[in-house]
Amino acid sequence: MSALANLPHLITLLDDESEVVREALQRELGSIRRELPEQLRLMRRRLTPEEEGHLNRILDPLRQTDLENAWMRWRWMDDPTTQLEVGVAQISAYLHGWSCQPTDLGRRLDALADEAFKDQGRMDARELAAWMFAFQHGGARFRGNNKDYYAPGNSDLFQVLDTGLGNPISLACLYRLLGQRFGIGIGGCNFPGHFLARVETDGGLFLVDCFNRGRFMPAADVARHHPAATPGVEEIIREAASTEAVLLRILRNLDESCGRARDTRLRQLMRRLAVRLMEE
């Protein structure tokens, strides 16, 4: 209670360079970190970019511990798509910063599904892909981030929802998670170099390139004619990617992105999560 009561004063100390003060701030603000966004909203207190940065640095060790302690809880879920949502939400909430909680992702996806339903009613897999990815009225709701392909934020579903930009796997995950809310079975295809969604519809198996306008491609054609096609690729296409495979690929993408950005701290964290996934 004392930390909440003293919140206005604590915020004024965010830029204090004293190690003792920073430790006290981490202890006090850390104790109310899950209530902070709502408390600041009630105070009508909008943090400056500098304050945001200080708060992220102060709370980051605690948030990192939260992530590592909660990681792998997605395996407790019965349904693979729900497992994926929980795992992606954990990663995305950490990437997005102190004001975000994993449970926020479900609410954001529910709101997007409500918007889609009000706009188009109940949709099938092709219609949903068109609603999400096709160019309409001068743009697409979601599209591939060609200009900054390797940015770590492309793996953050909160950022994808905010900006409409993502990488192949984050867009495919978004398509799958939104599809679940429409009762549409959408899987993933761990295709080499470019993750694809996987849909069984119209009596056949199709791969969906969410990065490139949600293009539907007959799986048999991809297996025969794609430059990367090999007997191994045929097997990858035939079997839907497991939750473990999808999450591991997201972590490996982040590993590479962090390497390019020279973010050693985040890269090491993603590697630890990947090792836990492979070991358990």
Image (cartoon, rainbow, N blue to C red):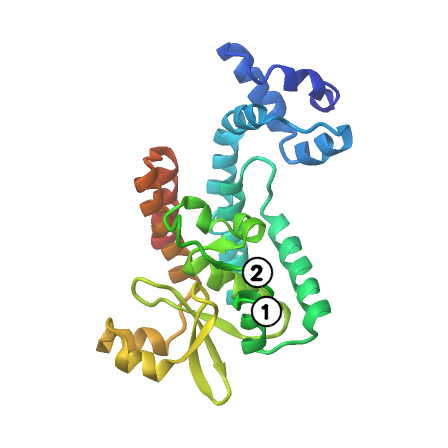
Q: Position of residue 148 (x, y in %)?
A: 39, 48
Considering depth in this image, is 128 or 38 the residue closer to the camera?
A: 128
Q: Say what secondary structure mark 1 lies in.
A: helix
The quarter of the image holding the N terminus is top right
In the image, residue 189 above or below residue 271:
below
Q: 206 left or right of 185?
A: left
Q: Earlier in the sequence, mark 2 or mark 1?
A: 1
Residue 78 appearing in the image: no
- The answer for how far apart the CA atoms under marks 2 and 1 are is 8 Å
Q: Position of residue 135 (x, y in %)?
A: 53, 66
Label 1 crowd bin: few (<14), some (14–19), many (20+), radius 10 Å: many
Q: Position of residue 134 (x, y in %)?
A: 53, 68
Three-letter code, disc 1: Trp
Q: Which mark is residue 131?
A: 1
Considering depth in this image, is 94 or 168 the residue closer to the camera?
A: 168
Q: Say what secondary structure mark 2 lies in.
A: loop
Q: In the orientation shown, which residue stands out farthest toward the bottom?
A: 203
Q: Say which residue appears at 54% left-offset and 71% top-offset.
A: 129
Report which residue position mark 2 lands on: 141
Q: Are marks 2 and 1 in contact (CB under 8 Å)?
A: yes
Considering depth in this image, is 64 or 99 the residue closer to the camera?
A: 99
Q: Say which residue appears at 50% left-offset and 11% top-offset.
A: 17
Three-letter code, disc 2: Arg
Residue 246 appearing in the image: yes
